[in-house]
Amino acid sequence: MINVFQPTLADEELAAVAEVFKSNWIGRGRRTADFEAAFADHLGVGHNRVTSVNSCTEALFIATRLAGAGPGGEVVLPTVSFVGAGNAVAAHGARPVFCDVDPRTLNPTVDDVAAALTPKTKAVILLHYGGYPGEVVEIAALCRDRGILLIEDAACSVASRVDGQACGVIGDLGVWSFGSTKIVATGDGGMLSARDPELVAQAAKLAYFGLEQFSGFSQAKENNTRWWDFQISSFSRRSIMNDIQSAIGVVQMGRLKGFVERRGEIVSRYDRALADLTGVVTPPPLPRGHTSSHYLYWVQMDEGIRDDVARDLYERGIYTTFRYAALHRVKAYGSDARLPGAEAAVARTLCLPLHQALSDDDVDTTVAALREVVTRRSAAPGSASAAGSAG
């Protein structure tokens, strides 16, 4: 099976984990501090501007809490977002307000966000679809003007930038994922950054029971008496990374540049090979000054054949998918929004395999299968394309 996502792990990561085992400490420790420092350096921010957590979803929960979301408040987010973002808002008692997206980029425009803001809006959560930064600079300016916090969901955008500035640090808070399907993969794990280091310090406490002191062992080393006593500043849970994950993460950060370069080569190969395929539209070019992590490669086609194309490709050993399902359609969120841009995108979009371990042969096999399947399905009696040709 040619997978749509796949991590790249090798002997370097295994050796790093072996070193953690030899240390006889597998919890949060020095390696986690090293990983946080490496990630802060990658972002170009101070080490006091980041803290790790056990998942991007937990980072979203913490960021939403720090933004003051709660009963009576609203948080605006694009409907094409990960379910973790919607859950983070709803779980705090706030109302998720879903905005539309551009049907080609699947990112919201600044006008889409502005149309959804109300006096009750506490924050905006912005996903950078597929690693494309989108109108993040304009949306950040809008939020600053309105006195609203911008949370960047940079799970797809570990290496995406606008004019050299990393996605995730353009707004007020940023979150990243290191799940098994991400470019930097540690199995599970996440990172949170904030423009205000005090918010990062609060986040670190929220990720560890709300404890005012993180470690009794550290307290003992500082000659404090009764180091087993503690105080808490919030009723929180435990959601930290450990040194096994972080040791993998440090190695992955060292390989990130090569990962993104290879993904860019694959994107270019798809672009060239699919440019003349009738009935298929490839992703739009990036605006000047924007760079992408190339997390997703999506094509768009007639909605009447999209699902059949996905099934035909799967039966040929090529796994495709659509990320992310429109959240305003999820009944639990109670939305009655009508979002035509998102509706069009959701019906027509398919994400092709994209990961750094893909060979050129894998890409060529995917392209050949897609060309054959789309051509056949488009010509089938009763298809929208065939009906249009007949007319």
Image (spheres, helix red, strand yellow):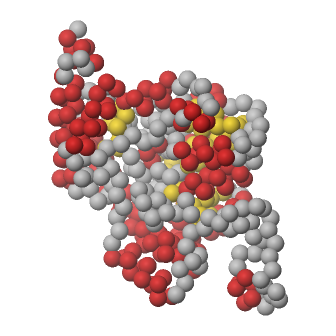
Residue 290 coordinates in the image, percent (x, y): 46, 45
Q: How many marks?
A: 0
**In the rendered view of the protein, which quadrant contains the C terminus?**
top left
Residue 131 vertical position relative to residue 377 in the rendered view, above or below: below
Name the one closer to the observer, 229 or 356.
Answer: 229
Q: Is 75 positioned to the left or the right of 367 in the image?
A: right
Residue 341 vertical position relative to residue 315 in the rendered view, above or below: above
Q: Residue at x 64, y 52 (%)?
A: 61
Q: Is 210 positioned to the left or the right of 84 in the image?
A: right
Residue 91 vertical position relative to residue 14 in the rendered view, above or below: above
Residue 216 coordinates in the image, percent (x, y): 73, 82
Give the quadrant of residue 388.
Answer: top left
Residue 304 coordinates in the image, percent (x, y): 31, 24
Q: Is 49 positioned to the left or the right of 35 in the image?
A: right
Give the quadrant of residue 135.
Answer: top right
Residue 265 visible? The answer is no
Residue 88 vertical position relative to residue 72 in the rendered view, above or below: below
Residue 212 visible? The answer is yes
Residue 383 coordinates in the image, percent (x, y): 25, 20
Give the quadrant of residue 184.
Answer: bottom left
Q: Residue at x 68, y 37 (%)?
A: 95
Q: Residue at x 82, y 86 (%)?
A: 226
Q: Residue at x 64, y 30 (%)?
A: 116
